[in-house]
Structures are given as C-alpha cells and as structure tokens.
Amino acid sequence: MTGPFPADPVPADPFPADPFPTAAFASWLALREPADAAARAPELAERVRGLLAGRSGSQVHDLGSGTGSMARWLAPRIPGPQHWILYDRDPGLLARARTGMPAAVTAETRVRDITRLTSDDLGEAALITASALLDMFTAEEIERIAGACAGAGCPVLFTLSVTGHVELTPPDPLDPRIAEAFDAHQRRTTADGRTLLGPDAAAFTAEALRGRGLRVWERPSPWRLGPGEAALTAEWFRGWVGAAAEQDPGLAGPAEAYTARRLAEAAAGRLGVVVAHTDLLAAVE
C-alpha cells in the first residue's frame, strides 16, 4: 500500500515531455519488466543490503521511476521499513507506480527534471536508484546528477545502462550496420542542442562518481531474450531498427526485408538476442 503523500505539483520548467503517450509507454515498460528483473545484477543488490544495514533513514529516491519496476525488484531485497520517493517527468506513469508498490512500502511521487536535482533535494536519502536511464542524458547533465548523488552521501545504484553491444543469433549480414546506426542515434544531438551520451553514459557516470570520491562497483546485466520473450524481442527489434533507419536513411530499403525476416524468426522462436547493459553501485569508501 502506498502512503498518504500527495504528488508534487508540476514545476514551471519540467524535463521535456516524453514523446510517447503514457499508456503506450507503460505497456512497453510492463513488457520489459520481467527481462529487466532477470538481468539486474543480484550481487549489487546484496551489497546494497549490506551497506544499508544499521543505517538510519528509510528513504529511497528513485530517479526516472516510470511505473515503479525498480521498487518492485529492489524493495524485497533490502532492509525495511522503506519509503520510496519516485521521480519522473510523466505524472501518468507516476500514478501507476504509486499504486503498484510492494506491500509494506510507502511512496510519494514528484514530477521533476531530475537533471536539476540538488544534494539538498536528496539529502534525506538512504539510497538513490535509477534504471535504464543514463543513456538519455548529456555529459553536463550526468555531471549534475553525479554531483547531487555524491553530495547526498548515500549509496547510489544505477541499473540497466546500455553499453552498445547487441548480439543476434543466428547472425545476419545487416546486423553490424544496424547496430552502428543505432549507437549513432543514441549519441545524436537533439533538436534542442543536447548531445546524448548513449552507450557511453555508464562509463562516464562511473568516472564522474569516482571523481567525487565514491567507490564504484560495476557488473554486467545483459538482456538474454529467447523463445520465451518473443513479444519483447519483436517490440525491441522494431524500435532498434526504427532508430537505426532514422539515423541512416540509406537503411530504409534494406531494413524492410531485414525486419520482416527477423520478426518471422522471432515469432518462430528461432531468434536469440543479447542486449548488453551494465549496473553500477557507488558508495563512500
């Protein structure tokens, strides 16, 4: 059950709205949640548990919480009681998150631009978390986030950051070109002039946290998708190829037949996909 805490009002300058409608994005998050849960590094969750043992405070600040999948995965693995403070730019996602918290966990929601959070905003946190988020930021934004987290003086767990490696089985001659274009799309400069870190974000964040005196532990957390994840594979694949074709218009023609071929393989349970991610945990030595 969630606690009786009101959501913050929408600020005057929120982070730019998500380009996807809430319902569609919530469906995507629900589809990927089991694969996310299976991929996250349990060793780091155990280390978090040890770091929190005996620590005062119960607040967990979850940055870019979406529908709350991080809380559903992590809350049972760390000591209680817990009060989660959920940040996102989409109030619709936050409303879903707040009603889906694990039993005995209270929660409140805040519609905020998380790149503008300060150490004062996070000052009462016992733990700061985020999942599948870092690649959407610029170097300057990551520096601000790292500074706020380091200033809070508590452990920080960032999971499921893409690292730019995708492996499809069986291989196809077009795979490398699609992968290269997708990675370039993740590193693109947006219409508002922001140059995203994409698959470089996890390594950049780790160094930003180390530079502020924190020790950082890193562990791989790959998606491994097979016949049991055919629906997720198909949805992920469409997005992967779509972003690549947007980045490299010359792919539009070849990608059509490639997509049909690969989706048929996925539907038949013959396509295996590994999408590399990394988890990192940072804490004061």
Image (cartoon, helix red, strand yellow):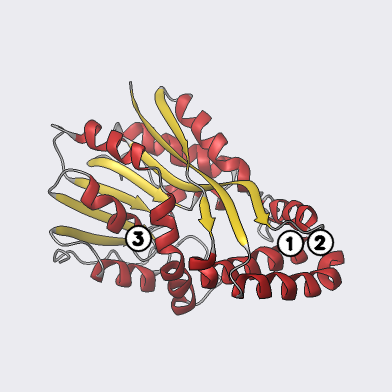
In this picture, residue 50 sits left or right of residue 35: left
In this picture, residue 222 sits left or right of residue 168: left
Q: Quadrant of residue 258?
A: bottom right
- Contact (Cβ within 8 Å) of mark 2 with mark 1: yes
| Disc 3 crowd, CA 10 A, few/some/many (<14, 14-19, 20+) | many
In the displayed structure, 143 sits above or below 77; it is above
Q: Earlier in the sequence, mark 2 or mark 3?
A: 3
In this picture, residue 282 sits left or right of residue 180: left
Q: Earlier in the sequence, mark 1 or mark 3?
A: 3
| Disc 2 crowd, CA 10 A, few/some/many (<14, 14-19, 20+) | some
Residue designated by label 2: 248
In the displayed structure, 83 sits above or below 91; it is above
Distance (Cα) linking label 1 and label 3: 27 Å
Residue 206 visible somewhere in the drawing: yes
Which SS class for mark 1? Answer: helix
Which SS class for mark 3? Answer: helix
Residue 194 visible somewhere in the drawing: no
Q: Amino acid at mark 3?
A: Ser
- Contact (Cβ within 8 Å) of mark 1 with mark 3: no
In the displayed structure, 278 sits above or below 38; it is above
Residue designated by label 1: 244
Q: Position of residue 113 (x, y in %)?
A: 44, 56
Q: Position of residue 71 (x, y in %)?
A: 29, 56
| Disc 1 crowd, CA 10 A, few/some/many (<14, 14-19, 20+) | many
User: What's the mark number on residue 232?
Assistant: none
Q: Position of residue 195 (x, y in %)?
A: 66, 49
Residue designated by label 3: 69
- Contact (Cβ within 8 Å) of mark 2 with mark 3: no
